[in-house]
Image (cartoon, rainbow, N blue to C red):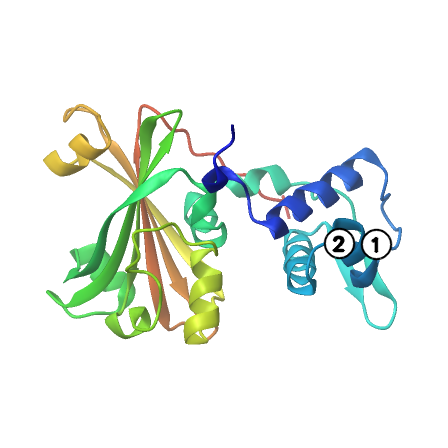
């Protein structure tokens, strides 16, 4: 029996269904996508669910909106399959409930030097961290930490030990009114600490890949840092981009 915890949110299920229809040719490129009301009736979901799904499809390049005409199908984006290879972006955008794992820390602590610099904080300042240990097939694979200035964590559900039903980006936008504009990504390699090696069930003599995604608003103001620690022997980072 499937656990309720593993069932994707309704909007994500709708996104996947519409993507399959586009890929199969049921909705060919250039065709008009069914209206919001038609999707609400067919899938028996709420308008916010439909709006959220259409926003994801538009942002990923599957569809486009034309003022006064509706939403048209563009087709499968050439680089759509590569989006999942950006771990920082994936953990910010995808509801936590879609990743099997547990919250291992949530609270204020002194920031590491690199995180402090990326957040624009003075040395030895405190920030809020929400850290989750992600597992796949019962084995720990990623240690994901969201670092925030203390004031941005207030009034949120980030101290909860339960997985969020929203993505971290969506949760912060709805609760704090901030708008993520771009992410500056850095990737480094280092040896794990004793605690990291224990949590990730990896040997101390194996290296870690540390991915830092520094989130900025449109003015360049630091909003958050997502830190993803990956055992180097279990992960491969791949990217793709258009040739100009």
Determine whether the residue tagged by mark 2 lies in a helix, strand or loop.
strand
Q: Does residue 36 appear in this view?
A: yes
Q: Residues within 10 Å of mark 2 (few under 14, many from 20)?
A: many
Q: Are marks 1 and 2 in contact (CB under 8 Å)?
A: yes
Determine whether the residue tagged by mark 1 lies in a helix, strand or loop.
loop
Gap between marks 1 and 2, in whole Å? 8 Å
Q: Residues within 10 Å of mark 1 (few under 14, many from 20)?
A: many
Q: Is residue 98 above or below residue 153?
A: above
Residue at image point 38% right, 28% down: 235
Whichever of labels 1 and 2 marks the residue nearer the N terminus, that label is 1
Q: Is residue 44 left or right of residue 232?
A: right
Q: Which residue is mark 2?
A: 63
Quadrant of residue 164 within the rendered picture: bottom left
Q: Could you say which is closer to the camera, residue 1 or residue 225?
A: 1
Quadrant of residue 154 within the rendered picture: bottom left
Residue 178 marker: none
Q: Which residue is mark 1?
A: 33
């Amino acid at each position: 029996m499937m656990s309720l915890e593993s069932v994707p949110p309704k909007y994500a299920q709708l996104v996947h269904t519409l993507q399959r229809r586009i890929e199969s040719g049921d909705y060919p490129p250039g065709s008009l996508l069914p209206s919001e009301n038609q999707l609400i009736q067919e899938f028996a979901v709420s308008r916010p669910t439909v709006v959220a799904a259409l926003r994801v499809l538009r942002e990923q390049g599957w569809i486009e909106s034309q003022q006064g005409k509706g939403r048209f199908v563009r087709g499968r984006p050439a680089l759509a399959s590569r989006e999942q290879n950006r771990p920082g972006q994936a953990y910010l955008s995808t509801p936590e409930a879609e990743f099997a794992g547990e919250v291992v820390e949530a609270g204020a602590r002194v920031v590491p030097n690199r995180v402090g610099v990326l957040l624009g904080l003075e040395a030895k300042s405190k920030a809020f961290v929400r850290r989750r240990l992600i597992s796949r097939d019962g084995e720990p694979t990623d240690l994901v930490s969201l670092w925030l200035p203390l004031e941005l964590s207030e009034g949120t559900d980030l101290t909860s030990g339960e997985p969020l039903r929203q993505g971290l980006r969506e949760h912060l936008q709805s609760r704090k009114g901030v708008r993520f504009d771009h992410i500056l990504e850095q990737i480094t390699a280092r040896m794990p600490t004793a605690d990291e090696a224990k949590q990730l069930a990896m040997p101390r003599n194996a290296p870690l890949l540390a991915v830092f995604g520094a989130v900025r608003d449109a003015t360049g103001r630091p909003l958050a840092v997502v830190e993803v620690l990956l055992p180097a022997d279990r992960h491969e980072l791949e990217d793709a981009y258009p040739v100009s």
